[in-house]
Amino acid sequence: MDERLRETLSAMMDDEADELSVRRLLSHDDQNEVREQWQRWQQVRDLMHEAPSASYSVDVAGAVRAAIDDQDIPIADKAEPVPRAGGYWHWPVAAMVTLALLVGFGAGAGWGTAPGDPNNALAFTGVDQRASQLALSKEEIALQRLDEQQLRQVRQYLLEHAQHNSVGAGRGSMGYARMVSANGGY
Amino acid sequence: MNILHKGKHATARMLMVIAWFVFAPFMAAHADNAAVDASESMTAMDWLERLGPALNMTSYEGVFVYARGDQVHSMRIAHRYRNGQVEERLVMQDGGSGEIVRKGMDVVCVLPDQGRIRLDEVIPSGPFAEAFTNQLMPVSQWYQPALMGEDRVAGYEVVTVDLTAKDNDRYSHRLWVEKETGLLVKSHVRDIDDAVLEHFQYTSLEITDDIADEKFEVQTEGREITRHLGAPEPQQSTVGRMTGWTLNWRPDGYMPAATPSSSNGKAVAFSDGLATFSVFVEPVKGLKMPTGASRVGASTVYIHEVEVAERPFLIVVVGEIPPETARKVARSVSIDDALAQRWVASDH
């Protein structure tokens, strides 16, 4: 993805993208890449703004999907008829949220991540640059490069560890969350 | 039924000790309005103590988000305490449908057919060890508690409590505690640079006794698996048992805790009352693992390989501890020659 598209995405996050840029973004060859970038930023944004990330209307998502699928029709007209102001296309919150749902959480981010999908490595992108600043730098392993079996084994360790703090150990929902997270592979 | 009885016992003890998360003193909210009124004068430690005592004994429903590293999950939860028994139902909100229903010590798991989840991995594969000491860990010895102020989370008034690590062998925590019940509604795990590594938060919440019974029934179609969270076999219950190996160093304040239910008793967990790490020691079998450290949010996985009696062994440290600490722990493990040989032999 080039810098300009990235900027457009970023502008969308801030409700400041102009329509042309958005259309260009949506016609970008690699929609997966766009989707992933958006999803990552959206997650960060949700956490920062503490927006709820569940239970949005599926119908609205459908409308946005239709709009995106049919790129000849101006998106703004079809999904959210919001007048442009000051040269910017102001994204209404609902559209922001549904787009996030559509391209992010709705796009298979979750339990059903396909095996062999390189994105599975997401689970281990927590391999943190920060950590490399520690004395560990030379030992730091990029778990992204683990093969399927090795990843599975690492997850197993994470899971067993999480279990100690989970149901029986009374950590309740936090324990479940860690456990599911250890399992998720996403 | 003996097993069931013992299970309750062991679990109750565990619950008392690691009462940090989620459950709150419902009793206190109702029976002790004076305490609520006095919330103005409560210290950070007072709030922390409220997190624990009436563990599990609050009833609520809502949706929470859990994020670590790049992963974000949300789950819907209903939880109530009735007739001395915890009932709980969690429904995954992302990806495929799945749910976990718990009634007392019985757990039912329904998970999607597709996807990468192995059903038997998600709920505990065996009994939990009789765990933890009988006393509350002196958390304030390793963390500096401080009352940070007031806030609002998921529509509820909360107080914010910081637990700042006093050394580099643990992460700092920030807790958002609901004022009336003491329910934990949000938490952060932060590293030394104050970066948030792990984030737990209710985005919607209702604390209420009035939750319909059907909210605790399994509703998802799919393969179900049922487990009973029983007590361990007596011979497995030794706290902190390290068969055939010794941990020569561990950070101050971490005490042996639950023995993991698997790994043939070759794993041990340690806790300082807030953070935990597990140490796995096992002979290298077919699979070759990379060595070194990796992080997922606040969780570190450190893998170290050693040769004992000409046999390769894998030492894995997993926990919510800094990578450097995990490394030191892993490298302090020494494996007993004779025991290692017998152990390898018995594996075949």
Image (cartoon, rainbow, N blue to C red):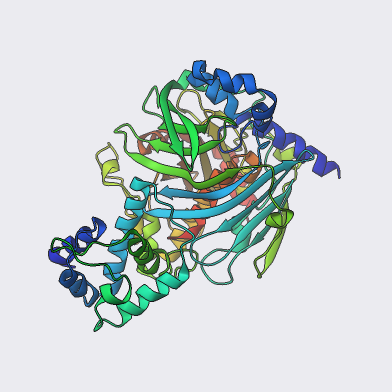
Quadrant containing the N terminus of chain A is: bottom left
**A104 vs B155, nearest the viewer:** B155
Looking at the image, residue B289 sits to the left or right of residue B244; the answer is left
In the displayed orientation, state which residue is furthest to the right: B1
Image side of residue B82 versus residue A89, left or right: right
Q: Is B105 positioned to the left or the right of A114 in the image?
A: right
Looking at the image, the residue that sits furthest to the top is B41
Q: Position of residue A21 (x, y in %)?
A: 16, 69
Reply above or below: A175 against A14: above
> x, y percentage for residue A88?
16, 63
Instruction: Name the image quarter holding residue B172.
Output: top left
Q: Is residue B347 visible?
A: yes
- Residue B293 in view here: no
Q: Nearer the viewer, residue B129 or B202?
A: B202
Residue lying at 50% horizontally and 15% vertically, measured from the top left: B41
At x 23%, y 55%, the residue is A14
Point out residue B128 in the picture as x, y percentages from the top left corner: 67, 43
In the rendered image, the vertical position of residue A131 relative to residue B132, given as above or below: below
**The one of A162 and A174 positioned closer to us in this rendering:** A174
Q: How many marks?
A: 0
In the picture provided, is B35 more to the left or to the right than A87?
A: right
Residue at image point 51% right, 23% down: B139
Q: Where's residue A122, x and y in %?
A: 37, 59
- Assign the C terminus of chain A to one quadrant of the image: bottom left
